[in-house]
Image (tube, grey):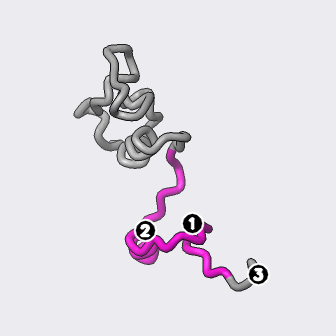
Amino acid sequence: MTWDLRLGPFGGVINTPAADELAKNGLRYSRFHTTALCSPTRAAILTGRNHHSVGMGGVTEIATSAPGYCSIIPKIKLRLH
């Protein structure tokens, strides 16, 4: 009975009170990259950038010295200016 679902501001059925409160005050995250993994998606949401460009090409447990896979977000890319 999908017509009974109460969707949040982002169209999901999962309760997201923090995101709902931000949206209610006018802030909506609508332009970010997602991946099939949690750490890269989190890095993309936090920085607003592609996960490889912030060194999070995979989950943090598989960090390497290869570009895009070090799992350390450069300070210059912590947020969009």
Amino acid type of disc 1? Answer: Phe
| Position of residue 41 measured from the top left corner of the image (x, y, whole percent) | 46, 43
> From this viewpoint, which residue is outermost toward the bottom?
4
Q: CA distance from mark 3 to mark 2?
A: 25 Å
Which residues are drawn in magenta? 5-32
Q: Is residue 69 above or below residue 4?
A: above
Q: Can you give x and y, in whole percent of width and height, for residue 14 in the image? A: 54, 70
Residue with the mark numbered 3: 1
Residue type marked 3: Met
Dot 3 or dot 1: first in sequence order is: 3
- Residue extending farthest front: 61
Residue 10 has which mark?
1
Do labels 1 and 2 touch, CB within 8 Å? yes
SS label for mark 3: loop
Mark 2 neighbour class, 10 Å CA radius: few under 14, some 14 to 19, many 20 or more: some
Which residue is labeled 2 in the image? 19
Q: Quadrant of residue 7?
A: bottom right
